[in-house]
Each structure stands twice: as C-alpha cells, then as structure tokens.
Image (cartoon, rainbow, N blue to C red):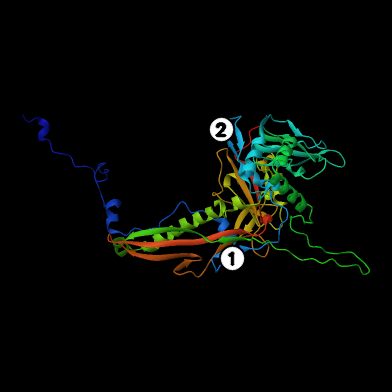
Amino acid sequence: MPTDTDALPTEPAPADAPPAPDSQQSLSTEAARQLTTTTKTEPQMQGISSRWLLRRLEWVDVKGGCYRVNRRRTLTPGRGRVQFVQNSADDVRIIPETLRALPILAEFPDTAVLEELAALFSVRHVERSQVIVTQGEPVTEAFIIAHGRLGRYATGMYGGTSALGVLADGDQLGDEAVGKDSPLWSQTVRTETDAVLMAVSWAAFGGLLAARPALAAHLERFVAASRLKTDKGGEAAIDIAAGHSGEPSIPGTFVDYDASPREYELSLTQTVLQIHSRVQDLFNDPYNQTEQQIRLTIEAIREREEWEILNNRDFGLLHNAAYEQRINTATGAPTPDDMDALLSMRRRTRFLLAHPRAISAFFAECNRRGLMPLSTDVDGHQVPAWRGVPIFPCGKIPVTGHQTTTILAIRTGEKDQGVVGLRQTGIPDEVEPSLNVKHMGINQQAIVSYLVSAYYSAAILVPDAIGLLENVQLGRAVS
C-alpha cells in the first residue's frame, strides 16, 4: 500500500554539493595510460660493482696468449704454510706433502720419508699467555702452529721489549736452526690465544736423519746453499767493489737467471647467450633486445673476471702472494699499526684493496684512537686513504666463517715490477678489449645463440709487489 511519503517530490541536490564517493567525474589515469607510451629505462642490474681492481690494474697485451715472468735466480727457498687434518681435539695430523712448505724440505721428493717425519710431531695444547720459547735459550724443538695466534717479542739493546709480529695457523718456528752449531732462540714467543701446536724434538729429528740418508743429504745441500752469498731477497749476490783506492782487483760477476720461469696462460670466462628470434625481430623499440642482453651478460662476465683474478687458485692474487709478504693482525681488528706494517713491506704501494666491512672495521679502530683517515682524489672520486694510499672496496674478497678477511696492498705496472693484468686485444669479433661475441647460429627452435668469451689473467712480477694483512677480524670490538 502506498504511503504519504511516496507521493512527495524529490528535492534536487544543491549545485555546489560534492559528488557521491563512488561517482567518476573524469578519465582515470589507469585508463589514460592505455593511450600513452611509457618512458622506459634500460634493464638495470644490481650485481654491478665498482670493480676497482680491474680499473686500477695496468694491463699488458699478451699477443702469444702466454706471458713469461723472468726473474733472477733465487738460492734461498721461500717459506710456505703447512696444512693439517683435524678429526678431533687430540687427533690433529700434518699432511705430509705440505711439509715441503718448510725451506729445509723444499723440493724433497720422497713422500714416504715426509710421512715418517709428520708422524714424529705430537699435539700440544697451550693456553693463552703461555711462553713457548724464551730468547737466549737453546733450541731443542721445532714447532708448527695448527691453530691459534702467537706473538713474537725480543729484548732490545737498551732493554725493553719490542713486538716483532704474529705467528698463526700453518706458520713454523725452530726449523731455521738447522745447520747451526748450538743454536739459541733469537726471540721470545708467547701465545696470544689458546693454541694447538705440533712439536718435534731435535733428538727425534736427528734419529730420522740417521735412518734416512737421502734426507740427510738433502739437508746438507740446503745448508751448503744457504752459505752462498745472497742479497736480502735470497737472490744470488752480484759482487761489486766500492770505496776502494789504488789498483785492487775488481771482482768479476754475472747475473744468473731462474732456469724455470713461470708462465701464465690466459684464462677465460665464457657463456652461451640465447635469444629467441621472435624477440630479436619484434621487440626492439625503444631498446634493442640483443644489445641489452649482450650488455648485461658482459657485465656479469666482468664481475666474474675480477673474482677470478682475486680467488683463482692458479693465478689469483690471494693464493699466489708470497708467504713472506703475509702478516697477521696484532689483535684481530685492523689497526693503524697493522696498516703501517703492511705498507712498510714494499715500495710504491699504489692502492689497498679491502672488503667494505674490513674498511668499516679499520675506521672503527681509527675512531677508537681519535684518528681521522684522509681521502684522496682518484679519477674525480673522493676515496678514503691511509698514508696517502687509496683504499678501494671490493666485495669479492672472501669472508670466512669466523668473520675474518684479508686486506691487500698492491704495487702495479711492469715498470715498477708490480702486479699486471694480462689480456689480448684485437681478437676476432671483439666488442671490448680481450672480450668477443661470436654468432653461433639458429637452432630448430628458432633460438639464436651467441658465444661470449673474455680472456684474462694476472701476474705478480716480483714477490713484494703484493702483500696481505690476514686474519682481519670484522665487526666492532666489544670491551
């Protein structure tokens, strides 16, 4: 039944009344975009880094694909690091072949004798702040550090104790006494952390020498070679007369060369880039799909190239730096003292390379001491520096599970006998120096393939061209 209100007329809305919430007055932006052309960017890539190492290396054009590093003959074998197998706290064993890292056993061929020698070492657990050897006392044992950090100290001419450095995993102590009569310890060694040592007495070692004439003969040759005249780098000395008067006989000499110089073959990084022909034909406005695919692929290859130059076991800088050019941090965190020690080991250090977290840890130590590292201009960039040497970040330097990493100090260039990058320019289908893109054809699925290849390597011309500050503890020290 109709009511009285149904017959009432509807009052019109005022002219200035707002529209209903869900009523649309004009074309929406979502609909309008259907008739417009959007402005697009090139494909972006988060994995692109600054690649400071590739940018700062001096590159040598290797036309023959192989680069030979000729050096003077070295009479003193270099020192390496011994490696271990650990099954439990008390079951720690030396890998016998790695005993050749000791100069006295370098190039010794008989692995069976090395196995006997490794079995002579016993495990010794030492707590923190314990003295292992004392300066001036007779040398009766040799030690290899399986784990831990040991500090070296010596009393100077005018009294007082000086810190000489740190020994860590794989380092050795006492083997330098071979061939010396009544050797004495030249330093005091104390544990800075709890440590696991492998120890052997000289009496046990002498018994092995008596039973194995081949080992005794090898050590005799080592002692005889160590008595030859060498310079500070262990190279055969060049006899020179100076400061004389009258007519003395001038010494004759010659410069001997290494008979087996190291050769570096160019390494490579490759991938096969695949693009469907329909994409290649139809979707090229405003950006060419093939060009963008190749551009991003090249970026990824260059990133891997820098990683290989640092980490490759054959030619990578971290694995090929001489052990004499490696030092450990004094306390774990990278301090200004550690950085000074690293820089003092070589001339003309061009730059320091460190993980970004290591740079942060170094700045934290500077803040603790009230120091402010300066910056230097590098190609228009303000880069942090220490002692005028720029510090470049590189996230490809590994960080271990114990949150430690390495800082590198590098001298570059052939002229300064430094580190050089190796590549070959002018290769077929080259799109960048030593990088080419070759068309491989189209398969039955209409996929076009391109082979993208980069050829490169790196060489350390002399051992002191690169130095490493190892076992750099990351994070902020908690007091």
Q: Depth check: give the residue in front, 105 or 83.
A: 105
| Residue hosting label 2 | 87
Image quadrant assignment for residue 462: bottom right
The kind of secondary structure element at disc 2 is loop
Q: Residue at x 94, y 69 (%)?
A: 246
Image location of residue 359, percent across then percent down: 61, 46
The kind of secondary structure element at disc 1 is strand
Determine crowd level at label 1: few under 14, some 14-19, many 20+ residues with C-alpha closer than 10 A.
some
| Residue hosting label 1 | 60
Relative horizontal placement of residue 270, taking residue 14 as reference (left or right): right
Disc 2 marks which amino acid?
Asn
Image location of residue 441, percent across then percent down: 34, 65
Disc 1 marks which amino acid?
Val
Quadrant that contains the N terminus: top left
Q: Residue at x 72, y 45 (%)?
A: 216
**CB contact under 8 Å: marks 1 and 2:** no
Q: Give the mark nearer the N terminus: 1 vs 2.
A: 1
Q: Please say whether residue 71 is visible from this viewpoint.
A: yes
| Residue lying farthest to the right in this orientation | 246
Image location of residue 114, percent across then percent down: 64, 42
Image location of residue 338, percent across then percent down: 70, 45
Quadrant that contains the C terminus: top right
Determine crowd level at label 2: few under 14, some 14-19, many 20+ residues with C-alpha closer than 10 A.
few
Image quadrant assignment for residue 440: bottom left
Label 1 or label 2, whichever lies nearer to me, is 2
Q: Residue at x 70, y 58 (%)?
A: 348
